[in-house]
Image: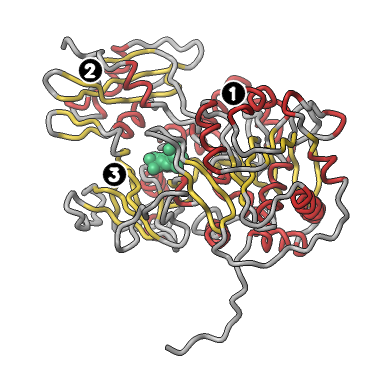
Amino acid sequence: MLMGLMQTTPLLVSGILRYAATAHGEREIVSRGVDEPIHRYDYARMARRCEHAAGALERLGVGAGDTVSSLAWNTHRHLELFYAVTGIGAVLHTANPRLFDEQIVYTINHAESSVLFFERNLLELVERIAGQLRTVRAYVMLTDEANLLPGAVGAVSYEALLAAVQPGFAWPSFDENAAAFLCYTSGTTGDPKGVLYSHRAVVLHAMAAGLASAFGFTAFDVVMPCSSLYHATAWGLPFVAPICGSKLVLPADRMDGAGLHELIEGEGVTFTGGVPTIWTMYLAWLDQNGRTPAGLKRVVIGGSAVPRAMAQAFKERYDVDVLQIWGMTELCPLGVVATPTPALAARGEEAMREAIWSRQGRLQFGIELRTADEDGADTARDGETSGALMVRGPWTIRRYHKHEADCVDADGWFDTGDIATLDADGFMRITDRKKDVIKSGGEWISSIDLENIAAACPGVKVAAVVGVPHPKWEERPLLIIETHDGASIDRAAVEDFLRPRIARWWMPDDVIFAAVPLTATGKIDKKTLRTRYRDHLADR
Ligand code: ADP
């Protein structure tokens, strides 16, 4: 083979920072803090602070190949750790503060982190778990000296660490396949599993996510990630925005309607994103307060299926386009993005919208997808035949951290655990997660489809559907509805709404009005619901 004669510059996360500081150093980063006023600076100043943070990490004895953990929100200091830790060749484990204590302890121990960086309002949590952390030898609170609460762990302040370092750190070059981030799946089944992102995967993922076929940011965009920095690196947004020269707005942990709206309006946010539950809340807040998110153009939503009613509400009430994505921690996390195509546009505005809203998204370069039947053979790409969704590509997992064997087949395909269809338009539609699908009398009922339809029923805030054991049909669907404040609906009204919209045998066997529990990543907690209502249909 004749080899190319081009440079093999490694794709490193620090390269994104160096580029942003040079090309659009004055573009702003605005961040809420914990008990602090809003903080403002720009990519150039952030890059300098990251250099200080890198020096501080070295003084703490953290070097290439070491892992440190964060328990932190969407703040500028957490963002700095994204670049500083990975920039020196160390690994940042972004622990999820919303997990149960025992799971947080498990992940930090499993990661073998030497330092724990945490937010001021998480001190109590850190004090509670510190005795069980086997490898952590230093605690750093993400605050300044004036606000420092050393607590029982004797934490030092991040700002004091940075201030003690001389400027002028030079980012080292190393193998692009070195690990950069360690993200754990939320452990809905068994222990959380660690996914170790390489620099190469993170950079390629960010470059692809910036394309017009995906997020398509320009230098005029103002991007506010409401997906958590600790959840699969907030969908790569902290890398895509600096690559594209977009302003970045970080809301910390204030995801309430008023808090989000203040930033959307005040900072001119054009693009934001997060799991559906955040937007259910924000849409209700807008409605109750008679406000409009002027300037907001697009909202990217994923992590769970986007109810059609949500996409419609954003478009029809506020002229905001919803961009559905599907992905998972194992994919850095982006898989597909629902952007329009000329072929869909040719069917007319309405038809195009319907086509886009009803599917998770369009195939992206860099992520190969196939659906397989029970024997592992390809299923037809006809938009009808569903199969196990398999994925492969340069930002797809090969092996979980510290596992003995690869989690892909001989051809590199990773089984996502989702059931999906692929179609001739190049779109993918999730019908369900394998473990959520309802098996009724030998047929399958899609819990996602039922939820999506029920969510459009007036008065419904969240609709959850789970399969529960049934003496005759094996499993039958149960619909749990959380209503909007002040809404009064009953089972008969919900059934009347569903009847013309679903097959007769899909009708839930009961409708329960109750609060819907959420997981640590803001999804409907179906495991809890299944356990809670396990015997609900036992005497039918
Ligand atoms: P966990 O929920 O276990 O923490 P992830 O956040 O990685 O893990 O979740 C990935 C899963 O979330 C996918 O496998 C899929 O089931 C679900 N998911 C993500 N986006 C969507 C979407 N747009 N529609 C339906 N399901 C989605």
**Contact between labelled residues 1 and 3, with CB atoms less than 8 Å apart:** no
Give whichever of discs 2 and 1 has the lower sequence position: 1
Mark 2 vs mark 1, foreground winner is 2
Q: Residue 509 carries which label?
A: 2
Q: Which image quarter is the N terminus in?
A: bottom left
Mark 3 vs mark 2, foreground winner is 3
Q: Which mark is residue 285?
A: 1
Q: Which image quarter is the C terminus in?
A: top left
Image coordinates for residue 280, horizontal then vertical, percent: 51, 28
Q: Which mark is residue 273?
A: none
Give whichever of discs 3 and 1 has the lower sequence position: 1
Identify residue type, mark 3.
Ile
The residue labelled by disc 3 is 419
The crowd level at tag 2 (other Cα within 10 Å; few <14, some 14-19, many 20+) is some
| Distance in Å between CA atoms under marks 2 and 1 | 32 Å
The crowd level at tag 1 (other Cα within 10 Å; few <14, some 14-19, many 20+) is some
Q: Which of 319 and 231 is in front in this view?
A: 231
| Distance in Å between CA atoms under marks 3 and 2 | 24 Å
**Contact between labelled residues 2 and 3, with CB atoms less than 8 Å apart:** no
**Contact between labelled residues 1 and 2, with CB atoms less than 8 Å apart:** no
Classify mark 2: helix, strand or loop.
loop
Classify mark 1: helix, strand or loop.
helix
Q: Residue at x 36, y 55 (%)?
A: 391
Identify residue type, mark 1.
Trp
Task: State ligand 1's quadrant.
Answer: top left
Image coordinates for residue 532, horizontal then vertical, percent: 34, 16
Give whichever of discs 3 and 2 has the lower sequence position: 3
Left or right: residue 287 versus residue 253 is: left
Identify residue type, mark 2.
Asp
Q: In which quarter of the image is residue 101?
A: top right
Residue 303 visible, this orientation: no
